[in-house]
Image (tube, grey):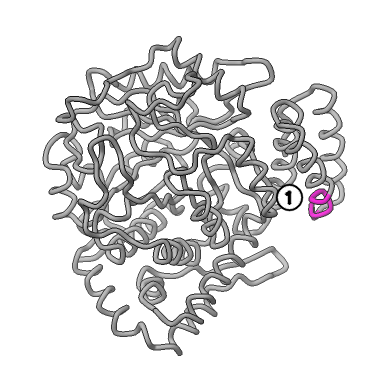
Amino acid sequence: MYNPKSLKAEEFIDDGEIRETLSYAEANKDNYELIDSILEKARPTKTADGWHCSGLTHREASVLLACEEPSRIERMYEVAEEIKLAFYGNRIVIFVPLYLSNYCINGCLYCPYHVENSHIARKKLTQDEIRAEVMALQDMGHKRLAIEAGEDPENNPIEYILESIKTIYGVHHKNGDIRRVNVNIAATTVENYKKLADAGIGTYILFQETYNKKGYEELHPYGPKHDYAYHTEAMDRAMKGGIDDVGLGVLFGLEGYKYEFAGLLMHAEHLEAVHGVGPHTISVPRVKHADDIDPDAFDNSISDEIFTKIAACIRIAVPYTGMIISTRENEKVRARMLQVGISQISGGSRTSVGGYTEEERPHDTEQFDVSDQRTLDEVIKWLMESGHIPSFCTACYRAGRTGDRFMALCKAGQIQNCCHPNALMTLKEYLVDYASEETKKMGEEMIERELLNIPKENVRETCKKYLDKIVDGERDFRF
């Protein structure tokens, strides 16, 4: 029985409800009157208190996803962009993954780290190697990391993760600092989530891979990850452990995308119903080639067009949630996705363990092939050329604007007076410390233009003063 307030996985992700939703969506995919009303409901509206958006239920959003009429699909893209600009502006947050260890005891059929892969090189970074990786990333200009590790209680215990977080935060190299560490590790206990919260992490990220229980168990034939309920209920334990911000995602291509889409939104609705705040981020990865993984072995691959439509419908359904796309996707796909709601991207990424200290990109320990292999500087320049402000901001997390506090500000449209100037100041740091001359010139021109878009005059003037201080050598200003 479907119950979004239940703490049982098979009740808040109810297979019967998903299948009824898909039937309803199929029956109404040509009901243009309904589709138009859903799109109108979803549009952001300006009020005296800021922008407002109603969002959509998983069933309403599934109707949009099922619609195949070209003009209405274009309208979906327009609404998605309106929503993204209303709440996130033209800022794009930059992050990078850091792989600590590829030791793993699971048998996931889509991941080259599975325990039966006997020819992949197994590697676990020492704390000295982590320091070297962090300094390499700081020399690029990165300020936030997402640490990744396989599930292996012996090689990657929680103590190793906690020690690694402490090491990362402790590296101060030239003008470089990692100001926020997000964590993407296996589902764990409330006690361990409390330890991660106490360590000062940003967002806890855990991909569901698939919400189809039968498919999930087949894709995870053995290992701790085989337990569907334990994995699916992890976000509730994380929030109980004091982690305000959690990030959802499925691996599109493993199962039917319409099923996954409905399940993903139901999970978001569940978090809102139980904890009063939905997911901080939703990621949209697709199955990609890796060491012994052939994406063609999965018969649910999706085209770039459908992928774009999925992202747009997610943005429309959960307007206040950040959306992430990684370097799994190529430049062309990432450019299109930025137009329909993506608010965070990785740049200069390597998915191998210890890859950033190597001059040549290593492939022997990669989790997946990186499609966008441009340097961070090239990504920054590309973003600015397309009218986006690259942001290295981490202010909300360090100012306590997390969970429901962040969402309250976002829903009131007040984040614009924080995030916009913070983006410009962190971009200025990048330009002064790391950028190529061409990127620096373009960035300085962008900052001058975008200062005019800060709504409050006093904030704008303070931001100008901070920008001057950054030139004089001071760092880490924030609103």
Q: Is residue 459 visible?
A: no
Hey, what amino acid is under mark 1?
Asn
Q: Nearer the viewer, residue 90 or 419?
A: 90
Give the answer, above or below, for where 230 lies relative to 163.
below
Q: Position of residue 148 (x, y in %)?
A: 38, 31
Q: Is residue 180 visible?
A: yes
Q: According to the image, label 1 marks what residue?
A: 417
Q: Residue at the spot x=19%, y=68% of the render?
A: 16
**Is residue 169 located in the magenta-colored stretch of the structure?**
no
What count of labels does the image hold?
Answer: 1
* Image quarter hosting the C terminus: top right
Dividing the picture into quadrants, the one containing residue 186 is top left
Q: Residue at the spot x=60%, y=33% of the render?
A: 398
Q: Residue at the spot x=41%, y=52% of the render?
A: 284
- The magenta stretch is 449-455
Give the answer, above or below, for where 370 lies relative to 452.
above
Dividing the picture into quadrants, the one containing residue 172 is top right
Q: Nearer the viewer, residue 270 or 171?
A: 171
* Image quarter hosting the N terminus: bottom left
Dividing the picture into quadrants, the one containing residue 262 is bottom left
Q: Residue furthest top?
A: 128
Q: Secondary structure at mark 1?
A: helix
Q: Is residue 197 left or right of residue 170?
A: left
Q: Nearer the viewer, residue 41 or 192?
A: 41
Q: Position of residue 38 (x, y in %)?
A: 47, 79
Bin the neighbour count of mark 1 within 10 Å (Cα to Cα): few under 14, some 14-19, many 20 and up.
some
Q: Is residue 433 left or right of residue 356?
A: right
Q: Position of residue 74 (x, y in %)?
A: 52, 75
Q: Residue at the spot x=28%, y=33% of the render?
A: 188
